[in-house]
Image: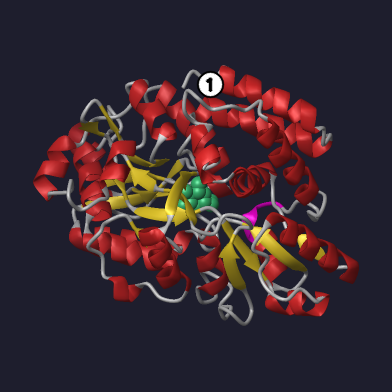
Amino acid sequence: MRRRLTAVAAALLVLVTSCSGEAVETPESSARERVEVFSWWTGLGEADGLKAMRALFEKQNPGFTFVDAAVEGGSGDQARALLSSKLQANQPPDTFQGHAGAELQGYITAGKLEPLNFLYDELKLRDAFPPQLVEQISVHGEIYSVPVNIHRSNVLWLNPAVLRAAGVPGAPQTLPQFLEALEKVKATGKVPLAIGPQWTVVHLFESVLLGSLGTKAYNKLWTADGDWNSAAMKRALTDFAAVLAFTGPPQTDWQPAAKQVADGEAAFTVMGDWAYSYFHNPPDGGLGKTSKKDFDWAPSPGTAGTFMWLSDSFTLPRGAPNREGALAWLKVAASKAGQDAFNPLKGSIPARRDADTSLYKDYLAWNQGEWARDQLAGSIQHGVVAGDGWRAAINDAVGIFMENPDVVELQRALVLAAKNSGQ
Ligand code: GAL
């Protein structure tokens, strides 16, 4: 009897989530099994893609209830902190979004993830993804996640009308041209370069570093031969200081900073291409702006020919409460249909090589061409080249620099961060 009552009570509960990421129970009936999917895709320009993939998951898996455990905040700064405490307490969500590369390697080394070779065999995924991407999510031949997309970090977003009014002929190609353009915009009284919270400045930092050092030297920084103490690095940090001098008041997240550009209050922002879906997606999920007219883009100054990449990938945590449900989610995320539902709305291109290219238009079509041609460099802020500890140390150094722009001190802190990185 008691058992039956419990079952009835359970049937009266369906789980939804608040934006703090805590599952909340509501008294609507559902006996289906919950699958908790953890990400930080809650806001405009972020949530549309997840919504589309969720709809496909629900259609294909009527036996499961999707629980959106997304935690608000661009780049997952809040989400990643909460995730880390959940994993430490061995209370993982059923699946979570992590970045391919060093960030994921951290979870793997800590023993938090199950290898997915069996899923790769079953779904023939080894050939579906680029080999260099599979390498980033593998350790000793075991593959640990399902990459759902490729995002680009080094994009300069701009407002053509603000540039015209300032007498800037077009997107600046080099860092000196960029500084010249920023100066001209400043003279008009508009915000030259919009930024959000500290992580968006680290995002800017990685683009300036790449543009100033060049791809080869930037990529070397993350190897045993990386030289953070070089004169070239000092020049790059001096360039960063010069660019930073033109930033506007920090906005609460990347969307309000991008909105300053869309609204013609600011000329530029350097942001990943999730900004494209924010500018472009119809109101509800985005700003409904027209590309080339209301906003435009170019590789961030000095980085043409290089694609600074990152990839969102989903995992199977050890001890996932609903392992079967998590696998059902991973199957959708890995599929051509899943990736083609998600990416056109997310502003990213599919990780799969066999996706339907005709679905990727405008910025996305341009970016697909770049991905096929460009050299590659990995993002710092979005988990590719530096593990969480190193990334946090770089964040701290940049944060201190924002208060006190002392290049020598920043270089000293970065040298130390590299030395202590353990990578
Ligand atoms: C990145 C993530 C992107 C996007 C962005 C802004 O770290 O990989 O998918 O969500 O943060 O929040």
Is residue 18 visible from the viewing direction of this image? no
- Residue at figure coordinates x 74%, y 67% from the top left: 267
Looking at the rendered image, the quarter that the N terminus falls into is top left
Neighbour class for label 1 at 10 Å: few (<14), some, many (≥20)? Answer: some
Could you say where residue 367 lies in the image, as x and y percent from the top left? 44, 65
- Report if the beta carbon of the residue with label 1 is closer than 8 angstroms to ligand 1: no
Which SS class for mark 1?
Answer: loop
- What colour-coding does the image apply? secondary structure
Judged left or right of residue 115, residue 234 is right
Q: Nearer the viewer, residue 239 or 409?
A: 239
Q: Amino acid at mark 1?
A: Ser
Where does label 1 land, which residue? 421
Q: Quadrant of residue 137?
A: top left
Judged left or right of residue 292, residue 55 is left
Q: Quadrant of residue 53?
A: bottom left
Chain part drawn in magenta: 252-256
- Residue at figure coordinates x 68%, y 45% from the top left: 201
- Residue at figure coordinates x 44%, y 70% from the top left: 366
